[in-house]
Image (cartoon, rainbow, N blue to C red):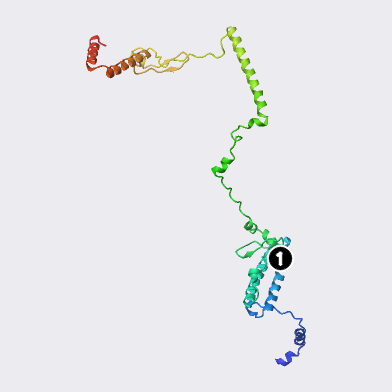
Amino acid sequence: MARNAEKAMTALARFRQAQLEEGKVKERRPFLASECSELPKAEKWRRQIISEISKKVAQIQNAGLGEFKIRDLNDEINKLLREKGHWEVRIKELGGPDYARVGPRMLDHEGKAVPGNRGYKYFGAARDLPGVRELFEKEPAPAMRKSRAELMKEVDAEYYGYRDEDDGVLLPLEAQYEKQAVQEAVQTWRKEKESRLSGDKPPEEEEEEESIYSAHKEEPEEEESQEEMEGEEGGVSFMAHVPVPSQKEVEEALVRRKKMELLQRYASETLQAQSQTARTLLGV
């Protein structure tokens, strides 16, 4: 194996040494912010991260990159944001300003605050990806129910219809229909008058009300009472198996009942006994 002195004399080693002396070699950013112990370098790395974030935010505005590329860019931006937060904490520990308090808010290209969910933020075209758009849709606020006092404020004379005639449309229509109704009523009255003068019967004749107390006379024979009798139109009439009182008999029974109630209410016991004796003698 070559010794260290020989390695140092190779062309690559001498070229790198020359670049370091001229200051052209870019220093690599530490993986952990805690490895940096100088405030100017910490400020430098923070500015570098902000520059990278700006470039990626500009790239993610292009919706034609495809869903997978947009998701990868959005993940890289969020990773750089977390790294920037670590460097800000380290700058504060080294005695620098507190960027978390005095720094500007994260804004998108439209100047609006970047929306997110639990620390993860979406930029540019990432907000229009499937499943992401629904996260930012705000549910419509439920309609507030009005109280009775608020509803009563809108109740006035117009609510009850007292101002319906003010528009000048309803009155002419009512007058037209009223005139038409009067003409129809006059024509109907004249037709009825002419029919009465000519002696014709009115078209509508009231039918006589059938008495509900009317009863057909039935023969007491048992054989005939059990047969079904057919009417003139071929209908079937059924015979009653119990004696049905006539209207006159019902009225007489009601009168007798009323008399007995009056006697029991106003007559003395002696008078009631005499009346009972008289009815017994008369056979009533």
Q: Secondary structure at mark 1?
A: helix
Image quadrant assignment for residue 60? bottom right
32 or 146, which lies in front? Answer: 146
- Tell me where residue 42 appears, x and y as whole percent: 67, 77
- Tell me where residue 130 appears, x and y as whole percent: 65, 58
Q: Is residue 151 above or below residue 169?
A: below
How many residues crowd mark 1 within 10 Å: few (<14), some (14–19), many (20+)?
many
142 or 240, which lies in front? Answer: 142
147 or 55, which lies in front? Answer: 147
Amino acid identity at mark 1: Val
Q: Is residue 242 left or right of residue 99?
A: left
Q: Is residue 278 visible?
A: yes
Q: Is residue 20 above or below residue 150?
A: below
Residue visible at 68% across and 73% down in the picture: 46
Q: Is residue 159 left or right of residue 223?
A: right
The N terminus lies in quadrant? bottom right
- Tell me where residue 18 appears, x and y as whole percent: 77, 86
Q: Which residue is mark 1?
A: 57
Image quadrant assignment for residue 20? bottom right
Image quadrant assignment for residue 32? bottom right
Q: Is residue 32 visible?
A: no
Residue visible at 32% across and 17% down in the picture: 258
- Tell me where residue 30 appears, x and y as whole percent: 66, 78
Q: Is residue 265 left or right of residue 183?
A: left
Q: Is residue 246 above or below residue 143?
A: above
